Image (cartoon, rainbow, N blue to C red):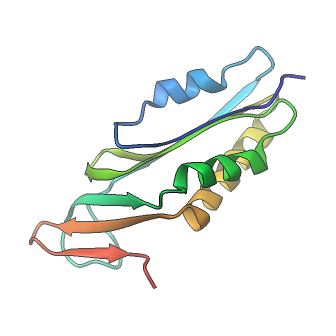
Amino acid sequence: MAPPAVSTAISAEPLDVAGHLAAVAHPHAGAVANFVGIVRDHDPETSGTVVALEYSAHPDAERILGELAGRFAGDGVRIAVSHRVGRLDVGDAALVCAVSTAHRAEAFETCRALVEAVKAELPVWKRQRTADGDAHWVGLA
């Protein structure tokens, strides 16, 4: 079995999807599942057109992202996951996750579970900017 590998980052730079795929490549891997979360121009809870998101992260976010990814790493599971911070325009990648495993079902399941954990637990917050100049935080209690 291939050794587990985990690569994580919180980055102000654009995320490299191909780099994530390369990070999980291994001769043992028969499957790679990938997720790319893209900034879209709308939000069901917002009136108006979304033009940008501004992400902010807690200082411990990178460590926490590593812990989240580590939950899913195991024998032969390789993971690369990153989240952007700063201003992102519509079409920019906010979250990239790549998972390789020996078989497709495990790759799909692991990728989805990790993305859901990141969305629920990573201390990263976003502020939406709309075309009319409005800005508001999303997901704050």
As drawn, the residue found furthest toward the left would be 132
Residue 93 horizontal/vertical position (percent): 38, 44
User: Where residue 81 appears, x then y in whole percent?
Assistant: 57, 41
User: Residue visible at 36% across and 65% down?
Assistant: 126
Residue at the top extreme, as displayed: 27
Q: Could you tell me which residue is drawn at 33 percent across and 70 percent down? A: 43
Q: Is residue 133 left or right of residue 109?
A: left
Seen at 65% across and 60% down, the residue is 117
Q: Position of residue 48 (x, y in %)?
A: 18, 73
Q: Is residue 133 above or below residue 68?
A: below
Does residue 66 appear left or right of residue 19 in this picture? right
Residue 68 vertical placement versus 105 (above, below): below
* Residue nearest the viewer, comparing 45 with 59: 59
Of the pair 97 and 55, the residue shown nearer to us: 55
Residue 141 percent coordinates (x, y): 46, 85
Q: Residue at x 34, y 53 (%)?
A: 39
- 33, above or below 130, in the image: above
